[in-house]
Image (spheres, rainbow, N blue to C red):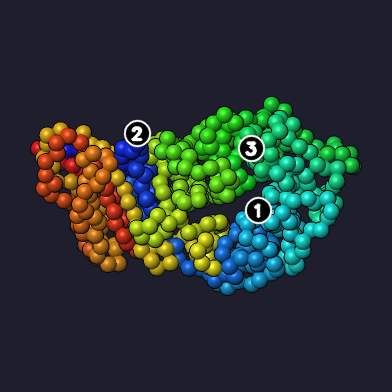
Amino acid sequence: MPELSIPLVRGDKQSDYDYRDLLPVNLTAVSRQIKGDSGYLISHDGLSEFAKTSGKARGGVYNERLRKHLRVSGEYLEEVKTDGTTEVIGVIPGNDICSFANSFNSQAIVAGGKLFLYDGQRLTQVGDQDLGFPIDIAWFNGIYVMTDGENIFHTNLQDESSIDPLAYLTSEFSADPTLAVARNDQNQIIAFNRYSIEYFRFRPEAQVGTELLALVQGKTTRIGIVGTHCKTELDGLFFILGGRREESPSVHILNGGQEATIATREIDKLIAQYSESDLKSVYMESRAVDRDKFVIIHLPNETLLYNHSVANKFGIDAAWTILKSGVDEATPYRAKFGLFEPRLSKWIYGDTIDSKLGYLDGSCASQYGEAVESQCYTPMIPLEAATINEFEIETIAGYATSDFSSKFSLSYDGVTFGESHHNKISTTYGYNKRYIVRRLGYIRQDFSIQFQFVSKDKMSFSGLKVRYD
């Protein structure tokens, strides 16, 4: 009988006179040849509790120089030990997201328009009258470089707690605000403005009392970011949420002075739900694990995952998924502010709901012991006047800790899905089990399938075969 091979990395729907994408939820694409397919979907890694903290997460950093894992939780700076215990170091007032940078002598934290320095023993607030109201910070050639939303300024070469009053400079390319700063692999300072990005080099020839930073001519890019934390570095590249003056915000990748858009049309539509003031609070972060490189974008009501490795191999249409916590309700992904803990070889994340830290757990899909819901979809499949005899999904069965089922439903119009049907995916130790559903019936014109399952265990889908007459 005839057979169709159907991809699962992105589905189709119809909405408001438009064709839209249905993105996988809590399932991540992996690029690998397996059973005749060039890739497969696997459940996103779960979360297991690692430590209790003094409040909800505001950011964290692993300081290689001090060999300490530091977190701002609630209003406290804490050291996180390898055994999961925490020790309060000092007070960081506020509830905003913190920015971090470190020198050879100290760890700097910018929070609530204030600058704090921790030397491994004591946390102090910088009280220099020339400090102003910093919102972001980077370390560069012996100085801390900061921005207050308008100016770029830095600490004194001889004193990290002193701000040189002559060290203030502003964007020369356009009058847009400077929202963030960072250092790139070419040892240059990047000034992320709202509609432009500028690069500065260190001036070793600078005399005392003169500016230490000089603009790199010809490298300015006419694109910028929406908010201070709408940027992240991955594999030597910067990923940003922003855009040009004449366009709506989108997701872009920066490579030197060049940029490219990596958002699909569906991602742009998700972003377009929000006003620019909403997007200012977005936080972006990155992670590299098992040769996959991810960018995570924490929108106000959704969390987007971009797989850069998959995008490079299959294109951006296969690279985007949605992460969420809980079941049924679309709760944004609770894990935030991830960092790699080299002493444990684990990714540790803060939590936006409870006062705790969790580690990324590849052995499960659950989040702190609670099952999560996963979803994937097929595109609309043109199959006129045919009868579906069966479909089969290639899975890796038998490894679940308990028997569990998937439910599927069909759509014949790209708008609504019909009655859900349950079929067992996996039984414990049932390694030879096949997921086959028979006698789906007559198809007049088009159809698509939605798959949903709730589980604490991980699952892989490597392909869908539909057999018909």
Which mark is first along the chain, 2 or 3?
2
Report the amino acid beneath label 3.
Arg
Residue at 47% of width from left, 51% of height from top? 301
Q: In which quarter of the image is the N terminus?
A: top left
Give the label, 1 or 3, closer to the camera: 3
Q: Please indicate, yes or no, whether residue 291 appears anywhere in the rendered image.
A: no
Q: How far apart are marks 1 and 2 (CA)?
A: 40 Å
Give the label, 1 or 2, closer to the camera: 2
- Kindly identify which residue carries mark 3: 194
Which mark is first along the chain, 2 or 1?
2
55 shown above or below 406: below
Please give the label number shown on residue 18: 2
Q: Please indicate, yes or no, whether residue 136 appears anywhere in the rendered image.
A: yes
Query: Badge 2: how crowded within 10 Å, few (<14), some, or many (20+)?
Result: few
Which mark is first along the chain, 3 or 1?
1
Report the amino acid beneath label 1.
Ser
Q: Is mark 1 on a helix, strand or loop?
A: strand
x and y, in percent, of residue 406 in the image: 25, 56
Q: Distance between the residues labelled 1 and 3?
A: 18 Å
Q: Nearer the viewer, residue 293 or 22?
A: 22
- Kindly identify which residue carries mark 1: 99
Left of 198 or right of it: where is 31? left
Left of 255 or right of it: where is 8? left
74 shown above or below 100: below
Report the amino acid beneath label 2.
Asp
Residue at 76% of width from left, 58% of height from top? 105
Dot 3 and dot 2 residues touching (CB under 8 Å): no
Q: How far apart are marks 3 and 2 (CA)?
A: 31 Å
Residue at 9% of width from left, 37% of height from top? 469
Q: What element carries label 2?
A: strand
Left of 16 or right of it: where is 424? left
465 shown above or below 86: above
